[in-house]
Image (tube, grey):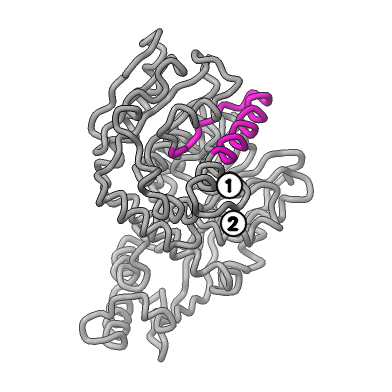
């Protein structure tokens, strides 16, 4: 029985992307060793290596604690030496471990990635990357020893090349037992190849919400709307259940469930999670596209104003996977009232909020839900007054040709002609309009 999966390799390979997405597909708990607490050492080699040793000792304790609870784990680690690997897997039998070895990126690429990470203070890999840059000559793995990493320690070893184009079973006592994880790895690799800039996009989204975290709760009208928050309350009330809040932000959407339920929030932004931590039971760094939770665990999944930044099909499939057979999902978000207004809002948002990948309609959300095995129970329709102060963030945006006010006036004219009900109008600092909002409740059908 496989109790421990390790994605190992030199720092700044794509191992974190692979590990996090495998966690979601296989229903494993994602554990990055870069986030392990450790004593603060100095930059000399002895202190650096001692920090590494302490980190893997701490990770080993965490893994055994989860294993004792029968929770399977996938570890994301930059191990490239068998002595460190032995420390990490101490207490496990070779037939209980799957080791996935990521190929090393070319040295110039690795160095640039380390510099980029070391400058990002909100990245959990910032400090480790700075350590590696200071100790580069001692940390570069010997290519021959890395190729042999795990041999004799793990019965199943899988190799992935640097471009994620080749997945190879290096060794396995029972090759057929590795079919499931090989198929999952191939799926992850294909998804990254189809969207080669996905890592850069995810970093941009994380930075965006890190920057918003301090004033997020009071930033726009919908976030603290009492009426919209009431729509998120389960009827009849949920008690003694498990609630998952995807894209939790600061935890506003799900904090009302805290009195009588276990509430878990997941978000890609560390700074958002630091704000959510006092409000929720558990905060997890990650995204809804690859949920690091086991099947059929939660009673309720909340998604509030986050689908714009995710693959909705994958998010709803993941939500269905982690929900109990009787589980429910609630989606709360702004929508376009018609295909015509969707086209106009998409043009407007592409300039003012370029990280948003889609503008949704009620019908489109319902279609995604039904295609993922959900049955819609009820839909609540609300209209808000939305004031978008675009010029307050103009230094982060590319100014349209002709300037901001010409752009606002042009979009206003289009809305007046095509969708007058939106009451879209330009202001001195941006625009105002009637924002359509939908809260959609659904339950898990027979598909899962």
Residues shaded magenta: 53-78
Ranked by sequence position, the earlier of labels 2 and 1 is: 2
Q: Is residue 214 above or below residue 181?
A: below
Give coordinates of residue 229: x percent, y percent.
Answer: 64, 61
Return the residue nearer the eye: 268 or 405: 268
Vertical position of residue 305 compared to residue 98: above or below: below
Q: Are marks 2 and 1 in contact (CB under 8 Å)?
A: yes
The residue sitting at 64% across, 46% down in the picture is 264
Q: Which mark is residue 273?
A: 2
As for residue 71 lying within the magenta part, the answer is yes
**Left or right relative to 87: residue 357:** left
CA–CA distance between discs 2 and 1?
8 Å
The residue where tag 1 is placed is: 284
Secondary element type, mark 2: helix
Q: Nearer the viewer, residue 19 or 227?
A: 19
x and y, in percent, of residue 237 in the image: 74, 46
Q: Nearer the viewer, residue 278 or 97?
A: 97
Can residue 447 be seen?
no
């Amino acid at each position: 029985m496989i109790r421990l999966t390790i994605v190992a390799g030199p720092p700044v390979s794509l191992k974190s992307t692979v590990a996090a997405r495998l966690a979601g597909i296989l229903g494993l708990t994602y554990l990055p060793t870069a986030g392990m607490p450790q004593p603060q050492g100095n930059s000399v080699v002895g202190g650096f290596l001692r920090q590494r040793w302490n980190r893997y000792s701490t990770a080993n304790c965490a893994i055994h604690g989860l294993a004792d609870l029968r929770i399977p784990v996938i570890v994301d680690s930059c191990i490239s030496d068998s002595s460190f690997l032995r420390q990490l897997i101490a207490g496990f039998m070779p037939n209980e471990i799957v080791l996935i070895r990521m190929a090393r990126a070319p040295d110039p690429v690795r160095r640039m990635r380390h510099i980029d990470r070391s400058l990002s203070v909100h990245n959990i890999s910032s400090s480790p990357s700075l350590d590696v840059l200071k100790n580069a000559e001692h940390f570069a793995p010997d290519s021959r020893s890395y190729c042999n990493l795990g041999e004799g320690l793990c019965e199943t070893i899988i190799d992935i090349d640097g471009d994620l184009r080749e997945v190879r079973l290096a060794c396995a006592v029972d090759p057929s037992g590795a079919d499931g994880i090989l198929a999952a790895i191939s799926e992850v690799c294909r998804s990254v190849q189809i969207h080669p800039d996905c890592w850069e996009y995810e970093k941009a989204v994380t930075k965006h919400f890190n920057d918003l975290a301090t004033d997020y709760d009071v930033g726009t009208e919908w976030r603290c709307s009492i009426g919209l928050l009431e729509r998120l309350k389960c009827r009849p009330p949920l008690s003694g259940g498990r609630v998952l809040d995807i894209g939790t932000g600061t935890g506003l959407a799900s904090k009302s469930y805290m009195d009588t339920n276990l509430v878990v929030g997941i978000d890609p932004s560390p700074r958002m999670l630091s704000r959510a931590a006092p409000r929720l039971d558990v905060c997890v760094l990650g995204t809804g596209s690859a949920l690091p939770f086991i099947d059929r665990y939660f009673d309720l999944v909340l998604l509030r104003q986050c689908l714009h930044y995710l693959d909705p099909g994958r998010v709803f499939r993941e939500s269905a996977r982690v929900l109990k057979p009787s589980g429910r999902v609630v989606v709360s978000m702004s929508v376009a009232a018609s295909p015509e207004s969707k086209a106009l809002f998409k043009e407007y948002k592409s300039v003012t909020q370029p990280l948003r990948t889609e503008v949704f309609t009620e019908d489109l959300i319902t279609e995604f839900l039904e295609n993922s095995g959900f049955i819609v129970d009820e839909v609540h329709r609300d209209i808000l007054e939305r004031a978008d102060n675009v010029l307050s963030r103009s230094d982060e945006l590319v100014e349209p040709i002709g300037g901001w006010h010409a752009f606002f006036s042009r979009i206003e004219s289009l809305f007046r002609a095509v969708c007058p009900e939106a009451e879209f109008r330009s202001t001195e600092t941006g625009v105002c309009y009637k924002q359509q909002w939908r809260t959609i409740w659904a339950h898990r059908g027979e598909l899962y």
